[in-house]
Image (cartoon, coloured by chain):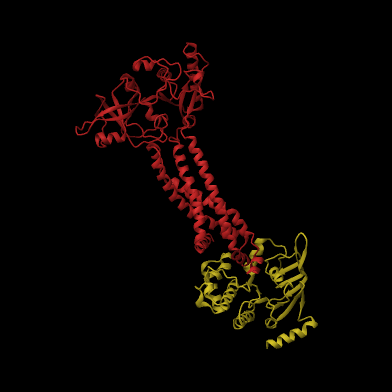
Amino acid sequence: MLKMTHLAKVYRTEVVETYALRDLSLNVREGEFVAVTGPSGSGKTTFLNVAGLLETPTGGQYHLDGEDVSKLGDDARSRIRNEKIGFIFQAFNLIPDLNVFDNIDVPLRYRRMNGAERKKRIGEALERVGLSARARHYPAELSGGQQQRVAIARALAGTPRLLLADEPTGNLDTQMARGVMELLEGIHRDGATIVMVTHDPELAVRAQRNVHIIDGQVVDLTEEPRFHGVHAEARQASA
Amino acid sequence: MFRYYIWLALRSLRRNPMLTALMVAAIGLGIGASMTTLSLFRAMSGDPIPQKSAQLFTPLIDNWGPDQREKNGEPGQDMLTYTDAVALMNLHAARRQAAMYATGFAVMPTDPTQNPFQADARATGADFFAMFDVPFKYGTPWSAADDEARADVVVLGRKLNDKLFGGANSVGKTVNLDNHDYRVVGVLDDWSPQPRMYDVMDQTFGEVEALFLPFNTAIGRQMDIWGNNNCAGPTVVDPGFEGHMRSECTWVQFWAELNTAEQVQHYRTLLDGYAAEQQHNGRFHWAPLTRLYDVRKWFDVQHVVPDESRVMVVVSFGFLFVCLVNAVGLMLAKFMTRASEIGVRRAIGANRRAVFTQCLVETGVIGLAGGLVGLALTAVGLAGMRALLSKDMADLTHLDLIDVLVTVALAVLAAMLAGLYPTWRATQVQPAWQLKAN
């Protein structure tokens, strides 16, 4: 589904070059739920931006759903973001003056879907996240957990091939966070491919696979023996 | 998608009413000021007979000599002498031609309850009506034979016919003018060319005369000249009307209809030949100088549109520019405060073109609102003009459908032009940075 090979992302200024990602290789298979962890500044967000085609890599190759997307132009990247990728952000990123229905409608509009199809998909997505009764509410009228559910519904409505979640519970209290995680797990059980960036080991261990990014490079915890202990401790704490 | 963008634009404008009001006011003020002056300028500089303005010509002959010429060497005259007008008439070189001058009468109404009143008139040739496409409500113009025979016939303007005959068909009836009876041969329909092209020296933007009579009839009756009468230079004027007819004073307008370039060239040659003949005969002591102007060129030569009007238009469009610069700043502020929303839209599928279109439609909606405000301000501005200007000019200051459409279109176009830079900036929003900033 997602295959990065020797990927690099360098931010250049006149005086300094900063390697956010260096020689990063990762393969996420269809239907996997992968958690990406790492300390602050390790490159997690850059990884997610590149994975979500919000930024272009400066080196290496990136194949998404079998297509080389490393060097696509803005139009093509926008189309792939719209059709194949669903985003869930830490800050929800709902548009405040659109109600729940219209927020979920946004990506479908850009796909030029007809009104009936859009309405059907929005209804199904809201039902999936348990917010059918809140369709006409505005984001400010919802709790944080509910807003994140709307964001998830917006991501699901387009039936993406890949869900990218950036600290999806970072702005939520424990109870709401649990609810959102259970929702993501349910979505995964239904067959979705999810890549979730988190700094929380307890959440990370609930994923199928846990990869760690340090200094812009990936270490796969399920394959790297020196991380097995850490992984086991986190899983135990979570249980 | 266009309807979706309109819907988004309306929501966006409602989100920050103060900023929206400022933008709409900036555009509305600029549009109101520029359209007020432009409406007046357009009315003053309009072509009153576009279908023929390139085929109607007025000739000038320099009968005063170099001392009386303009600084640029052009003839100082605006009209012809009676002598030259009659000579040109006798050339019969145009498809249609008419000499004319402004005069007037004391009208004695047939209704004894009405008091006598003065009415202005135009003494002109029979071709005048066909040449200027004058519409008739009743009857026809008089004939060339009537003109030759100095017949006592008149064509009434619609208003005078309304006043004297209650608007009924008065053809065949008589009107008493200066104690002479004249037979009505025709009644004009509504006709109000602006500018009044056949005589821009008197009441350039005024109404047409109340009635018309044959040129030779007026000459025969030695009817007073009510229009311009210029006796510049070493002109000697013998006493009486006949003295005036023989003088070098210019007081006769002359128009000729020339339909092809060959006819125009031929007419110029004849005109030059006539002036050369006058020099040869000892009347002119200078090389012949003649001119032949079509309607548009004649308006330019006569400065029908005052230079002040052009300056006012330039100044008001300068004001519009300043207003638009303000609008650019306000739009920039508006779009930049929405960088996070634009970032989200980009992340979930909007390409740059979609963001550009959305923002541009929003500027168009702002422009439309500004146009409506500008339209109201234009109406107020023109009402103010009416209070300040002379009646002739004031009558021009009205908004027609074209003005309304031009105002709104100009506002939308101006707003979209002003919005181009802010819109372009909006498309440069980096979604990754905006999402991180949140």
For residue B209, which quarter of the picture? top left
Q: Which x, y percent locates residue A145?
A: 58, 78
Locate the C terminus of chain B by quadrant: bottom right
Q: Residue most toward the top?
A: B281
Q: Residue most toward the right?
A: A226
Position of residue B283 relative to residue B16, above or below, is above
- Is any part of residue B393 visible from this angle? yes
The tint of chain A in the picture is yellow
Q: Please indicate whether residue B89 sits to the left or right of residue B211 in the image.
A: right
Q: Please indicate whether residue A137 sits to the left or right of residue B128 in the image.
A: right
Q: Which x, y percent locates residue A29?
A: 71, 76
- Is any part of residue A66 visible from this angle? no
For residue A42, which quarter of the picture? bottom right
Q: Which x, y percent locates residue A77?
A: 66, 64
User: Which chain is painted in red?
Assistant: B
Q: Please indicate whether residue B238 sits to the left or right of residue B233 in the image.
A: left
Q: Nearer the viewer, residue A63 or B344?
A: B344
For residue B81, which quarter of the picture? top left
Q: Which x, y percent locates residue A79?
A: 63, 64
Q: Nearer the viewer, residue A148 or A220?
A: A148
Q: Nearer the viewer, residue B70 or B150?
A: B70
